[in-house]
């Protein structure tokens, strides 16, 4: 209150009025349903204003100065009688699209920007093309509208069950937000589709999902060749280490030397990409940074180090020392920062292309690791823990494949079904057939047959 009073005790009305005006301005901007973003290339600020004459019930506005843009927004709501009524009762005309963008603006405060980007990608792919559906006022949205929309998306995109329900989740969360914001009293969301229309979700062939035994050896040799050609680049060694640890791509690139204790390594961080959420329609990358958590709580785990894993780590440290690479305590670094996931992805893709095998990914190295453990007798519960999964079903359904080629697979199946087959084979190998020694071979009697007429 002292700020409102001058030295002579008189209230500074000008100051008070200015404060009231600023508070009102802040309230308007807070209720503005569209994002305000800066376009670096054009050096201008953008947003939208409601406009019923446009296809999406909005028009884009821009100003060079952010304050000018905010003033334009405030003037719009204050001076337009029609929009004043809309401001008082936003739920009366709020479309599915407008609700979604308002929800996403709220969501940016709850989840990381990578999640926001994935949700926007699904919105742009599945929802945005259906202009009729997203233009429906939320208060008029019915279960039949939702049924028709979901069925049309399922048929048009031929979605598998998992992808379909991920897409549905966007509308579910948006409508839950509408209830919480008191735009609607009852949530019309439901999923009622013909489940026979789901795309075939059978497992992909093992040859496409894991490195087969012969491929793995060729690929490892190729990573060594690539390292020899560029000895300062430790990205190929990150790829090789993943065969020994089976971590997620972001996890292996966030390993630090302090995580290694004796013969074990602590996986508890990941490298993530951050995006600018100022403009949800054009989210741009702000780069990668390390966070002190993994994809899930179960991802925080300790892994045993193989002799080869220790050797790879020693080689990485030697390269960092030789070329003066360092960034905090991290292992895979270059030019003062962690190696990016794009760098290791490039090594894997180019390596597969060079040796002439189907292109695999870092995630398929992780599947190769899991499959190798299980095939060599490690209990599925342990495999699950090594991967950082919450339950065995995820591991078995999505990570276990056959790493042997067809010939070796046939041998193993036959040996399992006919144990005596191996025993007989071993015995026959040990038999020595002796022939009588003779300086001159005996004449053999050759039978004769009548000539064919």
Image: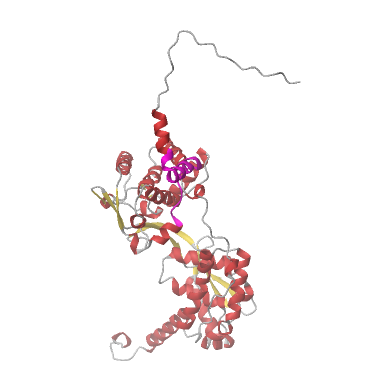
Rendering coords of residue 188 (x, y %):
53, 81
Taking the image as drawn, is residue 431 in sight?
A: yes
Compared with residue 80, is residue 286 higher up or lower down, i.e. above or below?
Answer: above
Q: Which colour scheme appears in the figure?
A: secondary structure
Pick out the residue farthest to the top: 439
Residue at 48% over, 71% down: 66
Taking the image as drawn, is residue 227 in sight?
A: no
The quadrant of the image that shows the C terminus is top right
Residue 271 placement: quadrant: bottom left
Pick out the residue farthest to the right: 453
Pick out the residue farthest to the bottom: 10
Compared with residue 277, is residue 225 higher up or lower down, i.e. above or below?
Answer: above
Rendering coords of residue 401 (x, y %):
46, 51
State whether the magenta stretch is mostly helix, strand or loop: helix
Query: Magenta stretch containing residue 407, yes or no?
Result: yes
**Start-end of magenta stretch:** 398-421
Compared with residue 61, is residue 317 higher up or lower down, i.e. above or below?
Answer: above
State left or right for residue 401 relative to residue 373: right
State left or right for residue 21 relative to residue 60: left
Q: Nearer the viewer, residue 385 or 363?
A: 385
Rendering coords of residue 153 (x, y %):
60, 68
Q: Nearer the viewer, residue 154 or 228?
A: 154
Rendering coords of residue 138 (x, y %):
56, 82
Label count reads: 0
Q: Nearer the viewer, residue 322 or 59?
A: 322
The quadrant of the image that shows the N terminus is bottom left
Query: Magenta stretch containing residue 347, yes or no?
Result: no
């Amino acid at each position: 209150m002292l700020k409102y009073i001058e030295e002579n005790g008189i209230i500074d009305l000008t100051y008070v009025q200015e404060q009231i005006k600023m508070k009102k301005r802040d309230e308007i901007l807070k209720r503005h349903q569209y994002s305000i973003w800066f376009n670096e290339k054009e050096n201008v600020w953008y947003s939208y204003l409601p406009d019923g004459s446009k296809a999406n019930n909005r028009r884009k506005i821009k100003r060079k100065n952010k304050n000018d843009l905010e003033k334009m927004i405030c003037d719009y709501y204050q001076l337009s009688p029609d929009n004043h009524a809309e401001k008082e009762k936003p739920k009366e005309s709020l479309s599915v699209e407008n609700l979604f963008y308002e929800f996403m603006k709220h969501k940016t405060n709850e989840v990381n920007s990578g999640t926001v980007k994935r949700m926007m990608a699904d919105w742009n792919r599945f929802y945005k093309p259906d202009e009729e559906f997203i233009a429906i006022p939320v208060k008029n949205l019915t279960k039949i509208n939702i049924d028709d929309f979901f069925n049309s998306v399922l048929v048009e995109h031929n979605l598998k069950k998992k992808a379909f329900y991920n897409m549905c989740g966007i509308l579910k969360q948006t409508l839950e937000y509408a209830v919480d914001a008191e735009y609607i009293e009852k949530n019309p969301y439901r999923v009622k589709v013909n489940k026979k229309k789901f795309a075939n979700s059978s497992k992909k062939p093992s040859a496409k999902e894991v490195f087969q035994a012969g491929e793995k050896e060729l690929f490892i040799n190729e990573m060594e060749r690539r390292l020899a050609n560029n000895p300062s680049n430790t990205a190929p060694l990150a790829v090789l280490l993943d065969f020994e640890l089976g971590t997620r791509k972001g996890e292996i690139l966030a390993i630090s030397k302090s995580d290694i204790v004796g013969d074990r390594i602590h996986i508890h961080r990941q490298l993530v990409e951050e995006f600018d959420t100022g403009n949800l329609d054009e989210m741009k990358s702000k780069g990668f940074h390390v966070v002190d958590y993994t994809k899930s709580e179960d991802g925080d785990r300790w892994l045993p180090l193989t002799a080869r894993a220790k050797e790879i780590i020693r080689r990485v440290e030697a390269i960092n020392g030789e070329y003066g690479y360092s960034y905090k305590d991290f292992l895979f670094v270059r030019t003062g920062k962690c190696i990016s996931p794009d760098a290791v992805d490039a090594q894997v893709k180019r390596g597969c292309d060079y040796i002439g095998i189907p292109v695999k990914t870092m995630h398929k190295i992780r599947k190769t690791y899991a499959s190798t453990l299980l095939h060599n007798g490690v209990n599925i519960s342990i495999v699950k823990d090594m991967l950082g999964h919450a339950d065995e079903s995820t591991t078995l359904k999505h990570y276990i494949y056959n790493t042997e080629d067809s010939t070796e697979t046939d041998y193993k199946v036959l040996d399992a079904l006919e144990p005596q087959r191996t025993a007989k084979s071993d015995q026959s190998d040990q038999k020595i057939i002796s022939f009588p020694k003779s300086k001159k071979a005996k004449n053999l009697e050759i039978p004769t047959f009548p000539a064919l007429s």
